[in-house]
Image (cartoon, coloured by chain):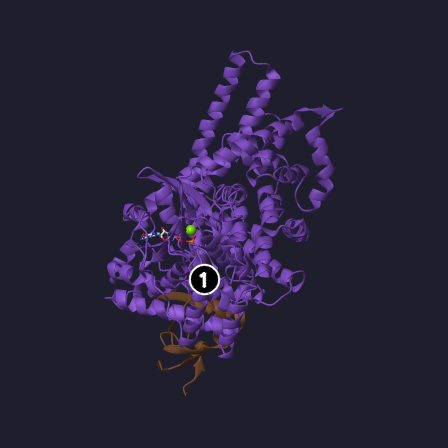
Amino acid sequence: MGLTKNSTGIKSVDTGFIVTKNNETDKIIALAGNPNVGKSTVFNSLTGLKQHTGNWPGKTVTNAFGTCKYNNTQYILVDIPGTYSLLAHSKEEEVARDFICFGNADKVIVVCDATCLERNLNLVLQTIEIKNNVIVCVNLMDEAKRKKIDVDLQKLQKLLGVPVVGTDASKGKGLKELLDLVEETSTNTVNIRYVKPIEDALVEITRLLESKIDSTDLNLRWIGLKLLDYNKELVSGISNYVGYDLDQDSDIKMVRESLASKGYCGEKLTDTIVSCIVLTAEDICNETVVFNNKKYTFKDRKIDRILTNRITGIPVMLLLLGIVLWITIVGANYISGYLFSVLFWFEDKLAEFFVCVNMPKTIYEILVYGVYRVLAWVVSVMLPPMAIFFPLFTLLEDLGYLPRIAFNLDKSFRKCNACGKQALTMSMGFGCNAAGVVGCRIIDSPRERLIAMITNSFVPCNGRFPTLISIVTMFFVFSVSGVKQTFIGTLLVTLFIVLGILMTFLSSYILSKTVLKGEVSAFTLELPPYRKPKIGRIIVTSIIDRTLFVLGRAIVVAAPAGLVIWILANVSVGEISLISYCSGFLDPFAKMLGLDGVILLAFILGLPANEIVIPIIIMAYMSNGSLINITDLSLLRDLLINNGWTWITAVSVILFSLMHWPCSTTLTTIKKETGSIKWTAVSALVPALCGIVVCFLFNLIALLLFA
Amino acid sequence: MHNLYTLNDLDINEEGYVSSLVSNEDIRRRLLDMGLVEGTRVKCVLKSPGGDPVAYNIRGAVVAIRNEDSKNIFIKTNQD
Ligand SMILES: Nc1nc2c(ncn2[C@@H]2O[C@H](COP(=O)(O)OP(=O)(O)OP(=O)(O)O)[C@@H](O)[C@H]2O)c(=O)[nH]1
Ligand SMILES: [Mg+2]
């Protein structure tokens, strides 16, 4: 979850599978494994980095790098996105396979889930089949213990022929042992037993390869398998890698043709190969895993029956959203008030100080009333809701609730010809739309992925929902006090978010009937077990991570914005200031949407970051009138009302905030992900047009009814 | 081979064994990767609010599949 450099993909490197070493002696370790088995948790524990983790499959979608030092060796770790298989049926699988196959990793650690070892062994076997530099890390041993699942690690090691270690990554247990194993080499690795015709062909082709290929770290048996189960691209990749053109070899072709004459070719061959792998995994699992409590999933299913029930499923979802928002609203109110008084007390001190040191008036005014003030607004109004919302949301994420949302909503997405996993990317969007857009990689079908990307900004990201919250608080719950006040506030914010979700459905539907027509693709989604969230860690990391990040972003974006707005407000051409000029120009159009020129200007200037929209509006209004010192939300409300705001304006601003162009970070990310200007433009236009239409209609109706 | 029916016929807590997948390439691959090969035991564990998708226990993992896909998975009541 969230708005950090990592999650927007800025720091993670995607392309290529050759990792550069700093030193010749550096060792590269790749972390592979099924989705949601704790790869990122292992990665974090070893590297001390804060790669995002979460209890749902598909959290990590980009390769991430980190280093750790152990026994005087520098290790470079690569966190690969989770895959179920290396047979390359999807883009991610291909990337993972190529990384393991042609990358320069010295070791591949396959992380497994001890509570679901059988399925995980599939990938282990496929990886061992490619190269024998594999270590198996059976993670989540604590969870297995709690569910009374015994895993005989020694036997597993013997059967697989590669080092095996049990870990509990969230507590850091077993990780030292894991690193100790990195130096070990494995010799007698397991071979998957294929059915007789395939096995015979394999033996023959391996014998041929032995005489034709000098030496390679790839298993010849695996190369043989890939030559039988022919894939042109991969074969040419292997040919390059081993320095021998396998494609042109007539001996090899003959073996393949003779196998085909026995009926093993194309689909049937591939299916048989997969079956053999799965059955080998089943055999190994039967010998190593004992389930002492057959009813270990009972509790999870009980919870599931409530959370995904026909009657309670959706209401509980809304209720949870409501509770999260309620806590956010109540908590943010307190912190905001406190920050207000501290920051604006400091503003006075700052001004006094500058006067003391005889700084020229214009300069200190720019600094204090331009730069500092916008910063202070961002911090005091926008930061508190984020700082509270995120830990709460991460809590739900860690519990494993997000995939249940996708499960509940898939039918609706299906009706819009979209993918249920869009619910996951939508949830990510609450943190940051750019992160949500990157997260869309978990959707396999390109068409459905585009729909998810284009519609992602209909969920208010953390730059926008503080706007929702503060406006709702100021305009709709002001006269009612106490619990009732916060209750109504919560209800309204929830309604606006639900509206955003409905717009997601509507626009997905329209897109899939117009520019993104096509077949729905298959949908499979794993529902992970519920896990106890690590509350301490969530609070520490999300608050520190988020607070620091938002502060950083505030400085980067809000400070220059403060500068610009101060200049616009204070430099005049003729009689009128630049800001009045600009807003005057926008005013007629903005009025049709229930806004005014200043508000629209703020949204335009807010392109780099939505956090600064409200601060810009405040600054602009303040520069028009007397320079009052606003010390809490009620004075702010007065300022807005003095500038002509009514409840209709408030609703219009909320609607427009919910639906306008995505911020520039999101747009850049969309450009990067799609590689297309056209789709980036569509992503900007779709929400903007929706916003314009909705605001226009709302105002028309409001004027007719209430004027 | 009597008692042949498809996966979406299963009610909650009912189980069966996969006899064949007639799904298209794309979904069949994905299901095979999840371990849904011939002879695999599947149990229906959860239905979503709209009755679609439905979640099944496949080799220890709970996987949601849409009815339009599960109706292409033939199952039988006993293992052989
Ligand atoms: N109890 C327990 N929980 C763990 C352990 N390791 C990881 N987790 C939790 O399992 C969940 C998944 O962890 P991640 O590290 O995000 O998994 P991943 O393999 O990177 O997942 P993807 O990026 O989606 O492929 C998180 O909620 C972790 O807190 C462990 O050893 N014990
Ligand atoms: Mg991960």
Specify the farthest residue to the bottom: B2
Q: Is residue A277 left or right of residue A685?
A: left
Q: Decide which of A606, B62 is in the foreground and name it.
A: B62
Q: Is residue A388 above or below residue A142?
A: above
Where residue A311 sits: x, y (%)?
Answer: 43, 67
Where residue A59 sits: x, y (%)?
Answer: 45, 52
The answer to whether residue A288 is visible is yes
In the rendered image, which residue does mark 1 sit on? A211
Q: Decide which of B30, A171 is in the foreground and name it.
A: B30
Q: Is residue A174 left or right of residue A26?
A: left
Q: Decide which of A651, A224 is in the foreground and name it.
A: A224
**Which amino acid type is marked by label 1?**
Ser
Q: Which chain is brown?
A: B
Q: Decide which of A259, A525 is in the foreground and name it.
A: A259
Q: Which chain is purple?
A: A
On what subunit does the disc labeled 1 rest? A
Instruction: Give SS at disc 1.
Output: helix
